[in-house]
Image (tube, rainbow, N blue to C red):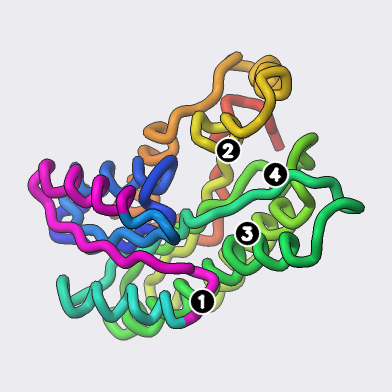
């Protein structure tokens, strides 16, 4: 489905980002893997991509820093000659309630989750506009729409901001045949829910009609659809994947 395509995937050393990078590679894409402070994880995913028979390069760094986005795009252009797909999966979360949340933690979550997405989008858009085609997928969250009992407000705000940014870019870049969409996962079986107490995790599981957490590979299937030609008439959408825990 992605034969001869080139994708940049941030947050790709683990979890949903890793699953997406491997899914894209198994469908014919070369990938640039981006993550902060986890070079070993990136190296491991790159090795898995190469075992599939596809090419991978790694760009360790902090997506909150604008220069990282420029570096990732330039490395991709030098290695592969183009950028067809961008997936923004880099994410951090904090859990203190609003009155206990430090300003440092507030700004750090916004910087990574929202500003990092903005920096990466701004870096690839000129290339996609020049060739009149591209796919951007922003990994938002169900928490953009529904407050969570054990997440700080900065996470929810950052994810809601991603949805607003998605719509803005979709509207302004549709004339260049660039599709910009978001995915809003519910509780997925990654390190995030695993960082919660067993009691809180079980409470969340019981609130899901399917009575289970989603798997990263299930999110990667949806990302593959949005990255492929099958979704060429979809832009500005936020697609929910949550086992029925949020229906609107």
Residues in magenta, as a range: 40-66
Q: Earlier in the sequence, mark 1 or mark 4?
A: 1
Of circles 3 and 2, which is in front? 2
* Cα gap from disc 2 to disc 1, whole angstroms: 23 Å
Image x and y of residue 34, in percent: 36, 61
Q: Is residue 76 magenta?
A: no
Q: Earlier in the sequence, mark 2 or mark 4?
A: 4
Task: In this rendered view, identify the residue nearer to me: 127 or 194.
Answer: 194
Regarding residue 167, the answer to whether it shows in the image is no
Task: In this rendered view, identify the residue nearer to me: 218 or 188.
Answer: 188
- What residue sits right under mark 1 in the picture? 65
Q: Is residue 44 magenta?
A: yes
Q: Earlier in the sequence, mark 3 or mark 4?
A: 4
Residue 163 tag number = 3
Residue 143 tag number = 4
In the displayed structure, does residue 205 sit left or right of residue 215? right
């Amino acid at each position: 489905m992605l034969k001869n395509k080139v994708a940049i995937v941030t947050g790709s050393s683990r979890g949903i980002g890793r699953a997406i990078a491997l899914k894209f590679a198994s469908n014919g894409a070369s990938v640039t893997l981006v993550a902060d402070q986890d070079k070993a994880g990136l190296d491991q995913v790159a090795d898995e991509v190469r075992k599939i028979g596809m090419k991978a390069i790694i760009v360790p760094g902090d997506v909150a820093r604008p220069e990282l986005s420029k570096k990732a795009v330039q490395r991709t252009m030098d290695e592969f000659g183009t950028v067809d797909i961008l997936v923004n999966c880099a994410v951090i979360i904090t859990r203190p309630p609003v009155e206990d949340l430090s300003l440092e933690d507030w700004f750090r979550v916004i910087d990574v989750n929202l500003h990092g997405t903005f920096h990466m989008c701004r870096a690839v858009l000129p290339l996609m506009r020049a060739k009149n085609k591209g796919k951007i997928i922003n990994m938002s969250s169900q928490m953009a729409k529904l407050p969570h009992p054990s997440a700080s407000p900065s996470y929810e705000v950052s994810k809601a901001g991603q949805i607003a940014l998605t719509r803005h870019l979709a509207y302004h870049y549709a004339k260049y045949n660039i599709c910009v969409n978001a995915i809003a996962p519910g509780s997925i079986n990654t390190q995030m829910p695993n960082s919660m107490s067993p009691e809180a995790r079980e409470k969340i599981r019981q609130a899901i009609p399917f009575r289970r957490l989603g798997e990263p590979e299930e999110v990667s299937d949806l990302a593959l659809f949005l990255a492929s030609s099958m979704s060429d008439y979809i832009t500005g959408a936020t697609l929910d994947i949550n086992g029925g825990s949020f229906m609107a």
